[in-house]
Amino acid sequence: MTEILIGTSAFTAKGWLGSFYPAGMAPRDFLSYYATQFQTVELDNTFYRTPAISTVEGWNLKTPPGFVFAAKIPQVITHEKVLVDCDDDLKHFLDTMTALGDKLGPLLFQFGYFNRSAFKSGAEFLARLKPFLKKLPKDFGFAVEIRNKSWMDAEYVDLLRENNVAMALIDQSWVPRPWEMKEKLNLITADFTYVRWLGDREGIEAETKTWDKIIVDRTSDLRNWIEVLKQMLNTKKILKMFAFANNHYQGFGPGTVKLFKDLWDR
Protein backbone atom coordinates (compact mmCIF):
# COMPACT_ATOMS: atom_id res chain seq x y z
CA MET A 1 0.00 0.00 0.00
CA THR A 2 1.22 3.50 -0.82
CA GLU A 3 2.48 5.46 2.17
CA ILE A 4 0.93 8.92 2.43
CA LEU A 5 2.81 11.57 4.41
CA ILE A 6 1.36 15.05 4.88
CA GLY A 7 2.83 18.01 6.70
CA THR A 8 3.57 21.71 6.43
CA SER A 9 6.17 23.86 4.71
CA ALA A 10 8.47 24.61 7.69
CA PHE A 11 7.62 23.84 11.31
CA THR A 12 7.57 27.40 12.67
CA ALA A 13 5.61 30.49 11.72
CA LYS A 14 4.35 33.69 13.26
CA GLY A 15 0.99 32.96 14.87
CA TRP A 16 1.49 29.23 15.47
CA LEU A 17 2.24 29.64 19.17
CA GLY A 18 -1.12 29.32 20.86
CA SER A 19 -2.91 28.13 17.70
CA PHE A 20 -0.83 25.07 16.79
CA TYR A 21 1.83 24.94 19.48
CA PRO A 22 0.63 25.07 23.11
CA ALA A 23 0.82 28.55 24.60
CA GLY A 24 4.09 29.10 26.41
CA MET A 25 5.99 26.32 24.62
CA ALA A 26 9.69 27.11 24.12
CA PRO A 27 10.88 27.23 20.48
CA ARG A 28 13.42 24.48 21.20
CA ASP A 29 10.48 22.13 21.77
CA PHE A 30 8.56 23.01 18.59
CA LEU A 31 9.95 20.28 16.34
CA SER A 32 9.48 17.52 18.92
CA TYR A 33 5.85 18.57 19.37
CA TYR A 34 5.34 18.95 15.61
CA ALA A 35 6.49 15.35 15.14
CA THR A 36 3.68 14.18 17.44
CA GLN A 37 1.14 15.72 15.05
CA PHE A 38 2.59 15.09 11.58
CA GLN A 39 4.85 12.46 10.00
CA THR A 40 6.79 14.81 7.73
CA VAL A 41 7.91 18.40 7.24
CA GLU A 42 9.32 20.34 4.30
CA LEU A 43 12.34 22.33 5.47
CA ASP A 44 12.25 25.83 4.03
CA ASN A 45 15.35 27.18 5.75
CA THR A 46 17.64 24.92 3.71
CA PHE A 47 16.73 27.06 0.68
CA TYR A 48 18.71 29.98 2.07
CA ARG A 49 21.86 28.04 2.94
CA THR A 50 23.11 24.59 3.82
CA PRO A 51 22.56 24.19 7.56
CA ALA A 52 25.29 23.37 10.05
CA ILE A 53 25.78 19.67 10.59
CA SER A 54 24.97 20.18 14.28
CA THR A 55 21.59 21.64 13.31
CA VAL A 56 20.76 18.63 11.15
CA GLU A 57 21.84 16.25 13.90
CA GLY A 58 19.55 18.15 16.28
CA TRP A 59 16.58 17.69 13.93
CA ASN A 60 17.31 13.98 13.91
CA LEU A 61 17.47 13.74 17.70
CA LYS A 62 14.21 15.65 18.19
CA THR A 63 12.09 13.40 15.96
CA PRO A 64 10.97 9.78 16.32
CA PRO A 65 11.79 6.84 14.03
CA GLY A 66 9.72 6.99 10.86
CA PHE A 67 9.55 10.79 10.71
CA VAL A 68 10.62 12.13 7.29
CA PHE A 69 12.25 15.42 6.35
CA ALA A 70 11.88 16.84 2.88
CA ALA A 71 14.11 19.82 2.13
CA LYS A 72 14.62 22.52 -0.46
CA ILE A 73 17.93 22.54 -2.32
CA PRO A 74 19.87 25.75 -1.51
CA GLN A 75 19.17 28.77 -3.70
CA VAL A 76 22.84 29.07 -4.64
CA ILE A 77 22.20 26.05 -6.88
CA THR A 78 18.73 26.87 -8.24
CA HIS A 79 18.69 30.67 -8.34
CA GLU A 80 22.24 32.01 -8.26
CA LYS A 81 24.23 29.48 -10.29
CA VAL A 82 21.16 27.88 -11.94
CA LEU A 83 22.78 24.43 -12.13
CA VAL A 84 26.11 25.68 -13.49
CA ASP A 85 29.40 24.92 -11.66
CA CYS A 86 27.57 23.90 -8.50
CA ASP A 87 28.74 20.31 -8.00
CA ASP A 88 30.62 21.21 -4.82
CA ASP A 89 27.62 23.12 -3.45
CA LEU A 90 25.33 20.15 -4.03
CA LYS A 91 27.81 17.66 -2.58
CA HIS A 92 28.20 19.77 0.56
CA PHE A 93 24.42 19.96 0.96
CA LEU A 94 23.88 16.23 0.42
CA ASP A 95 26.73 15.27 2.72
CA THR A 96 25.24 17.48 5.43
CA MET A 97 21.69 16.23 5.05
CA THR A 98 22.76 12.59 5.31
CA ALA A 99 23.09 13.24 9.05
CA LEU A 100 19.32 12.60 9.07
CA GLY A 101 19.93 8.98 8.14
CA ASP A 102 16.79 7.15 7.05
CA LYS A 103 14.68 10.19 8.01
CA LEU A 104 15.90 12.02 4.91
CA GLY A 105 13.17 12.19 2.29
CA PRO A 106 12.81 14.02 -1.04
CA LEU A 107 14.97 17.01 -1.91
CA LEU A 108 13.33 19.75 -3.95
CA PHE A 109 14.87 21.83 -6.71
CA GLN A 110 12.54 24.84 -6.58
CA PHE A 111 13.16 27.15 -9.52
CA GLY A 112 11.66 30.59 -9.78
CA TYR A 113 10.02 32.05 -12.86
CA PHE A 114 12.57 32.56 -15.64
CA ASN A 115 12.24 35.44 -18.07
CA ARG A 116 13.75 35.43 -21.55
CA SER A 117 16.97 37.02 -20.35
CA ALA A 118 17.64 33.81 -18.37
CA PHE A 119 16.37 31.25 -20.89
CA LYS A 120 14.96 32.05 -24.30
CA SER A 121 12.74 28.96 -24.19
CA GLY A 122 11.82 25.87 -22.26
CA ALA A 123 14.03 23.86 -24.61
CA GLU A 124 17.03 25.94 -23.56
CA PHE A 125 16.25 25.28 -19.90
CA LEU A 126 15.87 21.54 -20.54
CA ALA A 127 19.23 21.51 -22.32
CA ARG A 128 20.79 22.62 -19.04
CA LEU A 129 18.59 20.46 -16.82
CA LYS A 130 19.13 17.20 -18.71
CA PRO A 131 22.85 16.62 -18.03
CA PHE A 132 22.43 17.85 -14.46
CA LEU A 133 19.69 15.30 -13.69
CA LYS A 134 21.68 12.47 -15.26
CA LYS A 135 24.56 12.93 -12.84
CA LEU A 136 22.45 13.17 -9.67
CA PRO A 137 23.30 10.44 -7.15
CA LYS A 138 20.75 7.65 -7.29
CA ASP A 139 20.59 7.07 -3.53
CA PHE A 140 18.59 10.27 -2.94
CA GLY A 141 15.05 11.18 -3.97
CA PHE A 142 14.67 14.41 -5.96
CA ALA A 143 11.76 16.55 -7.12
CA VAL A 144 11.75 19.53 -9.48
CA GLU A 145 9.42 22.52 -9.46
CA ILE A 146 9.25 25.04 -12.31
CA ARG A 147 7.01 28.07 -12.55
CA ASN A 148 6.99 28.73 -16.29
CA LYS A 149 3.70 27.09 -17.15
CA SER A 150 4.35 26.89 -20.89
CA TRP A 151 7.40 24.71 -20.15
CA MET A 152 5.29 22.02 -18.51
CA ASP A 153 5.06 19.79 -21.54
CA ALA A 154 5.64 16.17 -22.53
CA GLU A 155 9.36 16.70 -23.11
CA TYR A 156 9.78 18.08 -19.59
CA VAL A 157 7.89 15.29 -17.83
CA ASP A 158 9.58 12.62 -19.95
CA LEU A 159 12.99 13.96 -18.90
CA LEU A 160 12.00 13.79 -15.24
CA ARG A 161 10.64 10.26 -15.68
CA GLU A 162 13.84 9.07 -17.37
CA ASN A 163 15.70 10.04 -14.21
CA ASN A 164 13.07 8.96 -11.63
CA VAL A 165 12.69 12.59 -10.52
CA ALA A 166 9.27 13.67 -9.29
CA MET A 167 7.45 16.54 -10.95
CA ALA A 168 6.42 18.77 -8.07
CA LEU A 169 2.66 19.29 -8.32
CA ILE A 170 1.81 22.73 -7.01
CA ASP A 171 -1.27 24.79 -6.28
CA GLN A 172 -0.25 28.36 -6.98
CA SER A 173 -2.03 31.33 -8.47
CA TRP A 174 -0.46 31.29 -11.94
CA VAL A 175 0.51 27.63 -12.50
CA PRO A 176 -1.89 24.96 -13.81
CA ARG A 177 -3.12 22.52 -11.19
CA PRO A 178 -2.95 18.75 -11.81
CA TRP A 179 -6.59 18.40 -12.84
CA GLU A 180 -5.96 21.04 -15.50
CA MET A 181 -3.01 19.08 -16.94
CA LYS A 182 -3.83 15.40 -16.41
CA GLU A 183 -5.52 14.89 -19.78
CA LYS A 184 -2.43 15.92 -21.75
CA LEU A 185 0.39 14.91 -19.40
CA ASN A 186 1.25 11.81 -17.40
CA LEU A 187 1.94 13.41 -14.03
CA ILE A 188 3.69 10.35 -12.57
CA THR A 189 7.41 10.76 -13.21
CA ALA A 190 8.94 8.90 -10.24
CA ASP A 191 8.12 6.22 -7.68
CA PHE A 192 6.86 8.95 -5.35
CA THR A 193 4.83 12.10 -5.85
CA TYR A 194 5.47 15.51 -4.32
CA VAL A 195 2.65 17.99 -3.69
CA ARG A 196 2.91 21.62 -2.57
CA TRP A 197 -0.10 23.76 -1.66
CA LEU A 198 1.40 27.24 -2.08
CA GLY A 199 -1.51 29.61 -2.73
CA ASP A 200 -1.45 33.28 -3.66
CA ARG A 201 1.27 34.88 -1.51
CA GLU A 202 0.59 38.45 -2.61
CA GLY A 203 -3.17 38.11 -2.25
CA ILE A 204 -3.20 36.55 1.20
CA GLU A 205 -0.49 38.83 2.59
CA ALA A 206 -2.75 41.75 1.71
CA GLU A 207 -5.15 40.30 4.30
CA THR A 208 -2.85 38.88 6.97
CA LYS A 209 0.73 38.11 7.90
CA THR A 210 -0.15 36.28 11.09
CA TRP A 211 -0.65 32.64 10.26
CA ASP A 212 -2.98 31.49 13.05
CA LYS A 213 -6.23 30.58 11.28
CA ILE A 214 -7.73 29.66 7.92
CA ILE A 215 -9.02 32.73 6.11
CA VAL A 216 -9.45 31.36 2.55
CA ASP A 217 -11.82 28.48 1.83
CA ARG A 218 -10.16 26.05 -0.56
CA THR A 219 -12.34 23.04 0.21
CA SER A 220 -13.39 22.70 -3.42
CA ASP A 221 -9.80 22.78 -4.65
CA LEU A 222 -8.71 20.22 -2.07
CA ARG A 223 -11.49 17.89 -3.23
CA ASN A 224 -10.06 18.19 -6.75
CA TRP A 225 -6.64 17.37 -5.39
CA ILE A 226 -7.99 14.29 -3.65
CA GLU A 227 -9.66 13.04 -6.83
CA VAL A 228 -6.46 13.42 -8.85
CA LEU A 229 -4.18 11.96 -6.18
CA LYS A 230 -6.38 8.94 -5.63
CA GLN A 231 -6.38 8.30 -9.36
CA MET A 232 -2.58 8.46 -9.32
CA LEU A 233 -2.35 6.13 -6.34
CA ASN A 234 -4.65 3.65 -8.06
CA THR A 235 -2.05 3.16 -10.80
CA LYS A 236 0.09 1.30 -8.23
CA LYS A 237 3.18 3.07 -9.63
CA ILE A 238 3.73 5.35 -6.62
CA LEU A 239 5.28 4.02 -3.43
CA LYS A 240 4.98 7.21 -1.39
CA MET A 241 3.06 10.46 -1.57
CA PHE A 242 4.36 13.60 0.12
CA ALA A 243 2.20 16.71 0.47
CA PHE A 244 3.00 20.01 2.18
CA ALA A 245 0.76 22.94 3.04
CA ASN A 246 2.10 26.49 3.05
CA ASN A 247 0.52 29.16 5.24
CA HIS A 248 -0.15 31.20 2.10
CA TYR A 249 -2.56 28.58 0.79
CA GLN A 250 -5.36 29.19 3.29
CA GLY A 251 -3.75 31.23 6.04
CA PHE A 252 -2.78 28.40 8.39
CA GLY A 253 -0.72 25.42 7.20
CA PRO A 254 -1.70 23.03 10.01
CA GLY A 255 -5.36 23.83 9.36
CA THR A 256 -4.97 22.93 5.69
CA VAL A 257 -3.41 19.59 6.63
CA LYS A 258 -6.31 18.83 8.97
CA LEU A 259 -8.89 19.79 6.36
CA PHE A 260 -7.22 17.67 3.70
CA LYS A 261 -7.06 14.65 6.00
CA ASP A 262 -10.73 15.05 6.93
CA LEU A 263 -11.75 15.28 3.27
CA TRP A 264 -9.50 12.36 2.31
CA ASP A 265 -10.97 10.11 4.99
CA ARG A 266 -14.51 10.89 3.92
Image (cartoon, helix red, strand yellow):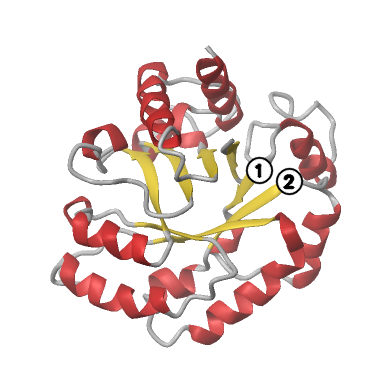
Circle 2 sits on which residue? 67
Which amino acid lies under the numbered mark 2 shown in the image of this protein?
Answer: Phe
Relative image position of residue 56 (x, y in whole percent): 75, 63
**Which label was assigned to residue 122?**
none
Q: Is residue 235 left or right of residue 183?
A: right
| Callout 1: SS | strand
How crowded pointer 1 is (Cα within 10 Å; few <14, some 14-19, many 20+) is rated as many
Q: Is residue 110 above or below residue 257?
A: below
**Pointers 1 and 2 in contact (C-beta within 8 Å):** yes
User: Residue at (42%, 21%) from the top-left corner?
Assistant: 216
Q: Earlier in the sequence, mark 1 or mark 2?
A: 1
Circle 1 sits on which residue? 40
**Total tally of numbered discs in the picture:** 2
Q: Disc 1 versus disc 2: distance between alpha carbons? A: 6 Å
Quadrant into which the N terminus falls? top right
Q: Is residue 40 left or right of residue 129?
A: right
Q: Quadrant of residue 227?
A: top left
Q: Is residue 117 visible?
A: no
Q: In this view, does 23 lie to the left or right of 150?
A: right
Which amino acid lies under the numbered mark 1 shown in the image of this protein?
Answer: Thr
Relative image position of residue 203 (x, y in whole percent): 34, 33
